[in-house]
Image: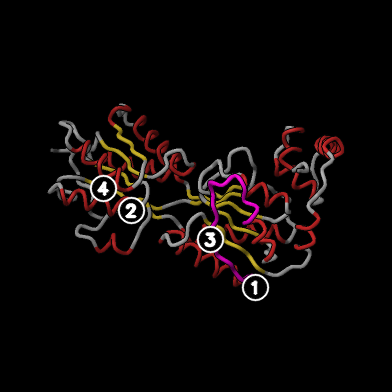
Amino acid sequence: MGSTIKDIAKDTNLSLATISKYLNGKNILPENKKLIEESIKKLGYKPNKTAQNLRSKKTNTICILLPFIGDYFWGFLCSIMEEYLRKYNYSTIISSYDAFSDDNTSELQFLLSKQVDGVILVPEYSGSITLPSLLLEAHIPFVCLDQELNGLSSDFVTSNNRTSAYQATKYFLENGHKIFGAIGGDLTSYTMKERISGMRDACREYNIPEDNLYIYGGDIASSADFFRNIMSMPNHPTAMLMLSYNYTLGTILTLSELGLQIPKDFSLISFDDDEIFSAFNPPITTVVQNLNEIGRQATGLLIKRINGDYELYPETKMIETKLIVRKSVANISTM
């Protein structure tokens, strides 16, 4: 098997993004250019001519690539991005891929067969760099959403997760809650780590001990067991921040099974809004992500790259969120 740009990156200690810029004829530092050229000669690197030839014709087609399809959040965001891309005269393909595979060549071949001009990629987790590396190798521009990639510089659009979780936690604290927690999925992902960091920021500011913060990451079924266990403790939490809206419905059901009422017996804030949350009795306080702005920034960045604009690369766009206060948090300051 021939050498790849990952081999060049390892040999030169330069980022994949820098090497990709060189291979695409973009300006880089002279010393980096020399390192790359020496490494190419030493390793015998040969560009993937098949991939380059397949991409020689512009098709005005973009692929939105996700590890799963059918999720409410991503489905809504995909429709927003599709609308923006239509304004740029681009058609959209929405497809899924195996984020946990060490070999994403089949996904790459799919993209090449469709001759896509660029990709909006949702990594499953921060270590999902196999497919992004192949995209760089094939000179296919891409923008990442939600998850920042470890060890690979790329354009990245996300919500300000840390600040949003800080604001939600601060709202708990301002309403007298001193023991609370968070429930979500994979806590090792970039998004979840940022949200947990935001909660801890607020706790430090209000001198709340770390032991007062109960955090759980797992599937929805096991999170229900975790919730039942902590609620059986003498000094149980009085509030919970749901790090993903998928977990909110499960927790509301568990509260009902335990005979607990929101917010009389327990307070709740959910990440991401859904029409159903405003229809609940009581309506649920939520952290709302600006999906329209995320879609606008992601599509705009990708079109820039497709048009050869790499003057500022890579770029990170951090989109602010909004806390929508409803009636699911009780003020227990005087209790």
| Rendered location of residue 184, percent (x, y) | 36, 44
* Residue bearing mark 1: 89
Please state which amino acid type lies under the numbered disc 3. Gly
How many marks do you count on the picture?
4
Q: Which mark is residue 117?
A: none
For mark 2, what is the residue?
286
| SS state under label 2 | strand
Which tag, 2 or 4, sits closer to the chain's start?
Answer: 4
In this rendering, which labeled residue sits more in front, label 1 or label 2?
1
Circle 3/circle 1 CB separation < 8 Å:
no
Q: Quadrant of residue 165?
A: top left
* C-alpha span from label 3 to label 1: 16 Å
Residue annotated with mark 4 = 268
Give the residue drawn at x 68%, y 59%: 304
If you read the primary sequence from the N terminus, does the residue marked by circle 4 or circle 1 appear first?
A: 1
Question: Badge 1 local density, few (<14 within 10 Å), some, or many (20+)?
Answer: few
Residue numbers of the magenta segment: 88-107
Report the residue marked by disc 3. 295
